Image (cartoon, rainbow, N blue to C red):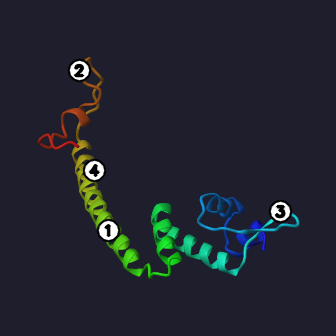
Amino acid sequence: MRVTELANAMNTTPDTVRYYTRIGLISPVKSTENGYKSYGKKIQQRLKFILSARKLDFSVEEIKEILTEADKGHTACPLVREIVEHRLAETEKQFQAALLLREKLRNAISDWQTKPDKDPTGSMICHLIEGDLDDGGNDE
């Protein structure tokens, strides 16, 4: 099957297929007769894995690691578990940070509803941000 046929079969774009070919995640067979690249069932299965992993937010580098293990005939499952556990911990930190930010924003909106608008001065642009949200200097 050719690039467009594979892309259609996998519900992706030909550019996506070409990209994964270019970076070496999939390797089509090149015809000696016409020079066309042909993608077989094994490559289709490999691309399916790549697309599924990308939907789970695996990076291209992580996918390369996983495929390298599989290509060696080793199970990639321990590596996949490790990556997912790490990603979950990162996501949890980001989620908690987002919850804190949401609370700060809610408090700001509530507080700022009664504050007057002020024109900028030489030492202040917006008093709402510059003066009224002092959180003890914990800015990042």
Q: Which residue lies furthest to the left in this view?
A: 136
Give the residue number, with chain letter if any, for mark 4. Answer: 105
Circle 4 SS class: helix
Give the residue number, with chain letter if any, for mark 1. Answer: 86
Question: Which picture quadrant has residue 75?
Answer: bottom left
Q: Which amino acid does label 3 sit on?
A: Gly
Tag 4 near tag 1, CB within 8 Å: no
> Which one is in front in this view, the residue at disc 1 or the one at disc 2?
1
Q: Distance between the residues labelled 4 and 3?
A: 59 Å
Front residue of 75/32: it is 32
Q: How far apart are marks 1 and 2 (CA)?
A: 44 Å
Between disc 4 and disc 3, whose residue precedes?
3
Circle 3 SS class: loop
Residue 123 numbered tag: 2
At x 62%, y 79%, the residue is 45
Between disc 1 and disc 3, whose residue precedes?
3
Q: What residue type is labelled 1?
A: His
> Which one is in front in this view, the residue at disc 2 or the one at disc 3?
3
As drawn, 37 above or below 70: above
